[in-house]
């Protein structure tokens, strides 16, 4: 039996807790959150106890911790969990600063503990199927990746002020997709953006719309377009152009029913938000984490992947702010 402590009882903590209790041989033992009521509600739902983080880390029976707390706590909790010898699953990003994220990665490497970062899109069945077919050579050598990533609406400005900005908060997932799908690293990145939906976002020093262009070591190209506002729902698509064809991964819809009448042809809008769109991916990534703990091997999304995605996010932020292409080849 693997006893687990969950740090963070918000919406993503609830999703992860619900998925981990479904794993054979895994038990949610502790929940910790600064919001005591939220922690109590989540703990009572799954037969766990509410304790402090210190108490959870000091319990030798706890084999793994799941970090789903606010971004500004991630690095500290990773380091504390490493010191306690726990396996770690942590939501993205590792930290808002690249220097501290690298320090976390070094601590993980030195302690030789498992640390998986929550880039759940790699576990989406559609995206994974595309990756498998790409790797099998179905469209030859990949040459260009186009990613569309749009939210139905922006989070509260109070959240954006401490989020690290759109590149670290939102596009960090797309930077991970870029590295995973093309199996390549960036040598240059150029980003531009605007604030088109809410002036308060600009006043907070952020943007809500961005376009990023990346060139890789092998000369491949990637373009990412993103927006905090898509009136029609959560828009998550990408396509890969190869030397012998193209592969596309489209949006998910609540149903696949298509209505055809004398007036129009219609179908459902895309799933409205990430919790619905990536429901299966969240379940599969947690199953993968515990499979690694039980059977060994390397997690599919390591802390090194978290550091590399954050490095791209930092470079994109700099490119946008200084209106120049950032050379990453050195």
Image: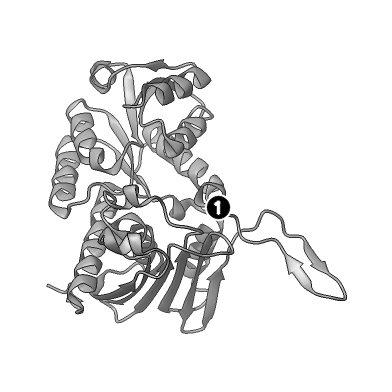
User: Residue at point 21% right, 61% down?
Assistant: 311
Asked which secondary structure carries label 1, the reply is helix
Tell which of 288 and 66 is nearer to you. 66
**Can you give x and y, in whole percent of width and height, for residue 255 in the image?**
71, 55
Residue named by callout 1? 277
Asked if residue 326 is positioned above or below residue 253 in the image, the reply reads below
Q: Quadrant of the N terminus?
A: top left
**Can you give x and y, in whole percent of width and height, for residue 170 in the image?**
37, 58
Q: Quadrant of the C terminus?
A: bottom left
Asked if residue 159 is positioned above or below residue 9 in the image, the reply reads below
User: Residue at point 20% right, 71% down?
Assistant: 321
Asked if residue 52 is positioned above or below residue 200 in the image, the reply reads above
Residue 115 makes an appearance in the image: yes
Tell which of 68 and 26 is nearer to you. 68
**Left or right of 200, for residue 44:** right
Tell which of 242 and 252 is nearer to you. 252
**Can you give x and y, in whole percent of width and height, for residue 173 in the image?**
37, 58
Residue 298 makes an appearance in the image: no
User: Residue at point 20% right, 25% down?
Assistant: 84
Residue 80: quadrant of the picture: top left
Asked if residue 49 is positioned above or below residue 188 in the image, the reply reads above
**Can you give x and y, in whole percent of width and height, for residue 288 in the image?**
44, 41
**Left or right of 276, for residue 297:** left
Instruction: Count neighbours of disc 1 (C-alpha within 10 A) and say few if under 14, some if 14 to 19, many if 20 or more.
Output: many
- Farthest residue in the bottom direction? 243
């Amino acid at each position: 039996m693997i006893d687990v402590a969950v740090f963070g009882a918000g919406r993503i903590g609830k999703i992860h807790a619900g998925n981990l209790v479904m794993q054979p041989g895994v038990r949610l033992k502790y929940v910790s959150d600064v919001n005591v009521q939220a922690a109590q509600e989540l703990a009572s739902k799954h037969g766990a106890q509410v304790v402090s983080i210190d108490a959870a880390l000091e319990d030798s029976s706890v084999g793994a911790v799941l970090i789903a707390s606010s971004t500004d706590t991630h690095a500290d909790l990773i380091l504390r969990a490493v010191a306690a010898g726990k396996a770690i699953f942590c939501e993205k990003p590792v930290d808002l600063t690249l220097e501290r994220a690298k320090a976390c990665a070094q601590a993980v490497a030195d302690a030789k503990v498992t640390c998986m970062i929550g880039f759940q899109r790699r576990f989406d069945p559609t995206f994974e199927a595309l990756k498998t077919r790409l790797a099998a050579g179905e469209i030859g050598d990949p040459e260009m990746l186009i990613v569309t990533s749009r939210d139905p609406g922006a989070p509260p400005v109070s959240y954006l002020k401490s989020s690290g900005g759109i590149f670290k908060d939102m596009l960090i997932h797309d930077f991970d997709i870029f590295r995973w799908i093309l199996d390549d690293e960036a040598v240059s990145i150029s980003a531009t953006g605007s604030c088109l939906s809410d002036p308060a976002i600009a006043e907070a020093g952020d943007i809500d719309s961005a376009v990023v262009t990346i060139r890789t070591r092998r000369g491949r190209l990637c373009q990412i377009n993103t927006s905090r506002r898509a009136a029609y729902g959560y828009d998550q698509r990408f396509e890969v152009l190869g030397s012998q064809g193209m592969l596309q991964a489209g949006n998910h819809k609540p149903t696949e029913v298509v209505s055809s009448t004398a007036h129009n042809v219609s179908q459902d809008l895309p799933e409205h938000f990430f919790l619905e769109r990536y429901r299966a991916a969240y379940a599969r990534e947690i199953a993968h984490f515990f499979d690694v703990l039980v059977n060994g091997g390397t997690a599919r999304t390591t802390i090194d992947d978290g550091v590399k995605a954050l490095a791209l996010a930092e470079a994109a932020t700099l490119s946008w702010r200084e209106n120049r292409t950032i050379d990453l080849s050195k």
